Image: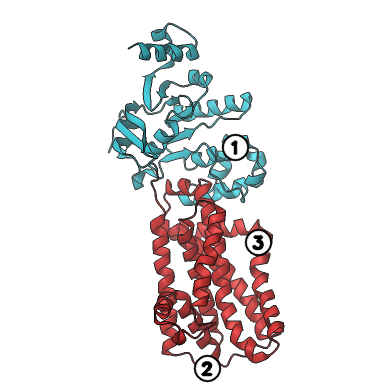
Amino acid sequence: MMNLSDPAIAVRDLRVARGGAEVLHGLTFEVPRGQVTGLLGPSGCGKTTLMRAIVGVQIVSGGEVRVLGEPAGSAGLRRRIGYSTQSPAVYRDLTVLENLRYFAAVLGAPKDDPERVLAEVGLAGAAHQLGSTLSGGQLGRAGLAVALLGRPELLVLDEPTVGLDPVLRQELWTLFHRLAEGGTTILVSSHVMDEAARCERLIVLRQGEILTDDTPGALRAHTGTTDLEEAFLRLIEERAAA
Amino acid sequence: MSFAITLATARRIMTQLRHDRRTVALMVLVPTLVMILLYYVMDDERSFGRWAPILLCVFPFLVMFLITSIATLRERTSGTLERLMAMPLGRLDLLLGYGLAFGLAACAQVALALAVSLTWLGLDLPGPLWPLVLVALLNALLGTALGLLCSAFARTEFQAVQFMPLVMIPQILLGGILVPRGQMATVLEWISDVLPMSYAIEAMAHAVADADPGGEFWRDVVVVAGSAVLALLLGAATLRRRTS
């Protein structure tokens, strides 16, 4: 049994090599429960690889990843983690609802879950559309809806707001915070800095290393600027000078 | 492994097929049309009676091999396989789901080709019908299993379709259709001995010619079924929860 004050994710000295090159160079951090934690950094910095390691689908070369008290990738975690990938993993030759019904059956989620998650991501109007006829943003939300099935304790969301208009983005962030208030832990990646301000905690990756792991407020205070983009630039300079 | 998840997977694959009516139509109609073509090309009942069972053997295998290898390759490249591997789905759930769904499709295919052959084309069976149906279905299952296995070695759909002649043509050449297996060079006969299609063709010949298929028929059936199970297990081994 794990303690509720234990972190949702505990990563120690995680190393991952892909195609012969090391892409994550010994990461150590924790993600607290019931919060929205942002994983930020430029494209290619290792965000997706790190998320895959947490979900347990990535071959790692060293270190330890514990998720909800169990080693990442354990069979017991498969119902407790919701994962949405950057390119939406849904069947293009099924309707949105058919996709959700299938994944709900695999997860053993309640019968009315597909309708619930469709409403949550604002896709109820496209329920009977084939995946191949959806726009990029709609497909992304369909993928996100799959991750919400079965009310998982941990959501790992890889760039869920890419390509969405500001209103939809706002709605999704509201949803993330509502879920977090209900006790769900959310790890969400983004490469746009203006989304950082919406997170309760930030982990910034750069070239496979952690640049900073702090709250947005503390980050602003530490770097003496209110602009997060500016704060990141100062951190990088600071690191280069050291 | 879970019965409910296997069934849900089979249902999902059937739904995908339902949205693709043209594929279903081709799958069900093509073998029958080729059968009719064969009948008029042969133009005599005896030659047709010799070739018809071979087609009934080759077609379910061929079509299921192609469809399964493309379908699973898509599953691998679209990310849905990774998503499923992160969920409580057993690898056999997925494979048996495919086997079940495409097996049903193969039933429709074989049923129509058989019905037309037995009525309109006057194919004569001295014995019961079930041995023929059994062999055709086992062949469809073997095709599904080998398709799953081969899709693991293809990165693109172009590569996947190239596996079809690679797997198919040697088995047909060495299966005793063109030259009786006993008349081949020893090495070729050895190779023929380990190819499952040789046994499928032999079983089909028994199913069509014998009033009461006996021991040799059952040995062939067991070999084909065993090959399908082996290919399915090897296919399961190629599905990885963790990838690089």
Residue indicated by mark 2: B211
Task: Evaluate whether residue B2 shows in this view.
Answer: no
**To which quarter of the image does residue B195 belong?**
bottom left
Marks 3 and 1: CB-CB under 8 Å? no
Q: Is residue A166 above or below residue A155?
A: above
In the figure, the shade used to draw chain A is: cyan
What is the quadrant of the C terminus of chain A in the image? top left
Query: Chain under label 1?
Result: A
Per the image, label 2 sits on a secondary structure element best described as loop
Residue where numbered disc 1 is placed? A119
Q: Is residue A175 visible?
A: yes
Closer to us: mark 3 or mark 1?
Answer: 3
Q: Which chain is red?
A: B
Residue at (62%, 72%) from the top-left corner?
Answer: B109
> Which quarter of the image is occupied by the N terminus of chain A?
top left
Which residue was labeled with disc 3? B23
Where is residue B87 drawn, in percent x and y?
Answer: 43, 47
Residue A189: percent from left, percent from top? 47, 29
As drawn, the residue found furthest toward the front would be B185
> Does residue A230 appear left or right of residue A126 in this picture?
left
Tell me the kind of residue under disc 2.
Ala
Please report, as a chain letter, where disc 2 is located.
Answer: B
